[in-house]
Amino acid sequence: MNIQPLKPHIDATEIAPERLAGNTALTEKQKIAEASRRFEAILLKQILDSSQKTVIKSKYADDSTASGIYHDMITTQLADSISKSGTFGLAKTFEQQLDRPTAATPKLIDPKDSTLHHLASRQPQLSHKKTISAAHSAVQHLKPLHERTIAKPH
């Protein structure tokens, strides 16, 4: 009877961020999930920091460097706890966006199928240089994206 040894359970939260991508014990899905969670925690910390700036200072509050460090540590822990709980939901959205299959990504345009090549094949009576310059001048007459109007379907 051949019994496989148990693999130790590795908690991705205990791995340093700079070593997360190179860790072979974690699956790609676990790496993406942890990176998404940590990014969410960073965003939450910035939101919490910004929200604390609006608090009116009191003459009874300690405004020392030690107090600032203490408040920063509390904010970091609070953001990390919210992120670990999963209630905010931003990490799940990041994870879904990053965990898409690579086959669904659009392919790059083949240079043989470019617009200039298409125009050149449709107008064989013109020389190649004239066709390219005609296509280039046609492209220059296009309006910038912010000036274009989109036709609405009827």
Image (cartoon, rainbow, N blue to C red):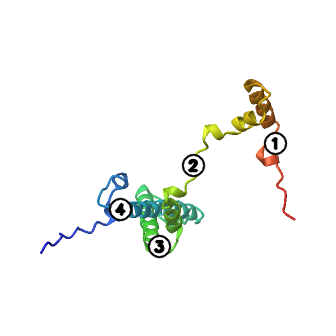
Q: Quick one: SS at disc 2?
A: loop
Provide the secondary structure element on which disc 4 rests.
Answer: loop
To which residue does mark 1 refer?
A: 143
CB atoms of marks 1 and 3 within 8 Å:
no
Judge from the rendering whether residue 93 lies leftward or rightward of residue 20; answer left or right: right
Residue named by callout 4: 27
Q: Cα distance, mark 1 to mark 3?
A: 45 Å
Q: Amino acid at mark 4?
A: Thr
For the residues bearing labels 1 and 4, Cβ distance under 8 angstroms? no
Q: Nearer the viewer, residue 101 or 53?
A: 101
Q: Earlier in the sequence, mark 1 or mark 2?
A: 2
Find disc 2 in the rendering and name its residue: 107
First in residue order: circle 4 vs circle 2: 4
As drawn, 40 above or below 87 = above
User: Mark 3 and 4 residues: CB-CB less than 8 Å, in contact?
Assistant: no
- Nearer the camera: disc 4 or disc 2: 2
> What's the residue at 58%, 45% (across, down)?
108
Label 3 sits on a secondary structure element that is loop
Residue type, numbered disc 1: Lys
Determine the CA span between mark 2 and mark 3. 34 Å
> On the image, which quarter does residue 33 sit in?
bottom left
> Is residue 112 or residue 27 the one in the foreground?
112
Foreground tag (3 vs 4): 4
Which residue is pictured at 82% across the width and 47% down the height? 147
In the image, which is nearer the foreground, mark 2 or mark 3? 2
Q: Amino acid at mark 3?
A: Gly
Residue 38 falls in which quadrant of the image?
bottom left
Q: Residue 86 — which label?
A: 3
Tell which circle, 3 or 4, labels the residue nearer the N-terminal end.
Answer: 4
Q: Residue furthest front?
A: 125
Q: CA distance from mark 1 to mark 2?
A: 27 Å
- Residue 137 location in percent, x, y? 80, 32
